């Protein structure tokens, strides 16, 4: 696993998503266009059991930070949280790590739900 902590951006894939998003913004893209750039670059990986939820969580968090959460990203991120399959990679890391990741995801879930 390319993760070194339990936070949303304590993961290589999430940092790659952030890099793509921020590069697009730095090039003059709107937050919506930056989100589209992430989806274009990582679209195929969204179907991956491990990386897909990480991409959605990172993109949703970035969009929340910019005040431009797309409804489809919000919905897909909430669905991934509810499915819970994203936690399978954390189960082997031990109870403390799993609990920490659950807290990070729950915080994101609460922020996503406040946008409804």
Image (cartoon, rainbow, N blue to C red):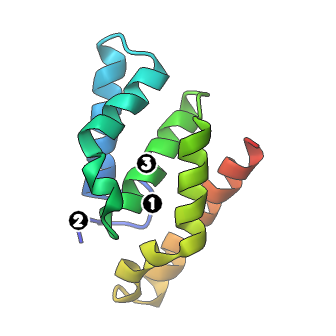
> Residue 91 is drawn in which quadrant?
bottom left
Count of numbered circles on the image? 3
> Residue 17 is drawn in which quadrant?
top left
Quadrant of the drawing holding the C terminus: top right
Disc on res. 58: 3
Q: Residue at x 59, y 28 (%)?
A: 68
Residue named by callout 1? 7
Q: Residue at x 37, y 66 (%)?
A: 5
Measured in 3D between alpha carbons, the distance from the residue under mark 2 to the one under mark 3, in whole angstroms, is: 14 Å
Badge 1 marks a residue whose secondary structure is loop
In the rendered structure, the answer to whether residue 23 lies left or right of residue 109 reads left
**Sequence order check, earlier mark of 2 and 3:** 2
Relative image position of residue 37 (x, y in whole percent): 32, 30
Residue named by callout 2? 2
Measured in 3D between alpha carbons, the distance from the residue under mark 3 to the one under mark 1, in whole angstroms, is: 10 Å
Measured in 3D between alpha carbons, the distance from the residue under mark 2 to the one under mark 1, in whole angstroms, is: 12 Å
| Residue in front for this viewpoint, 24 or 92 | 24
Q: Residue at x 31, y 22 (%)?
A: 24
Say whether marks 3 and 1 touch (CB < 8 Å): no
Which residue appears farthest toward the top when viewing the image? 28
Tell me, yes or no, if residue 96 can be seen here: yes
Q: Eyeballing the image, is 25 above or below 39?
A: above
Relative image position of residue 14 (x, y in whole percent): 34, 51
**Sequence order check, earlier mark of 2 and 1:** 2
Q: Residue at x 35, y 39 (%)?
A: 39
Q: Residues within 10 Å of mark 2 (few under 14, many from 20)?
A: few
Relative image position of residue 47 (x, y in whole percent): 33, 61
């Amino acid at each position: 696993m390319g993760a070194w902590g339990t936070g949303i951006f304590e993961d290589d894939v999430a940092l790659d998503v952030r890099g793509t998003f921020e590069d697009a913004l730095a090039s003059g893209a709107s937050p919506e266009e930056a989100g589209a750039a992430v989806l274009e670059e990582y679209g195929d990986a969204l179907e991956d059991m491990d990386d897909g939820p990480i991409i959605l969580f990172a993109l949703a968090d970035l969009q929340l930070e910019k005040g431009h959460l797309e409804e489809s990203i919000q919905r897909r991120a909430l669905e991934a949280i509810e499915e819970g399959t994203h936690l399978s990679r954390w189960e082997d890391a031990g109870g403390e790590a799993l609990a920490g990741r659950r807290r990070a995801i729950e915080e994101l879930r609460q922020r996503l739900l406040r946008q409804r």
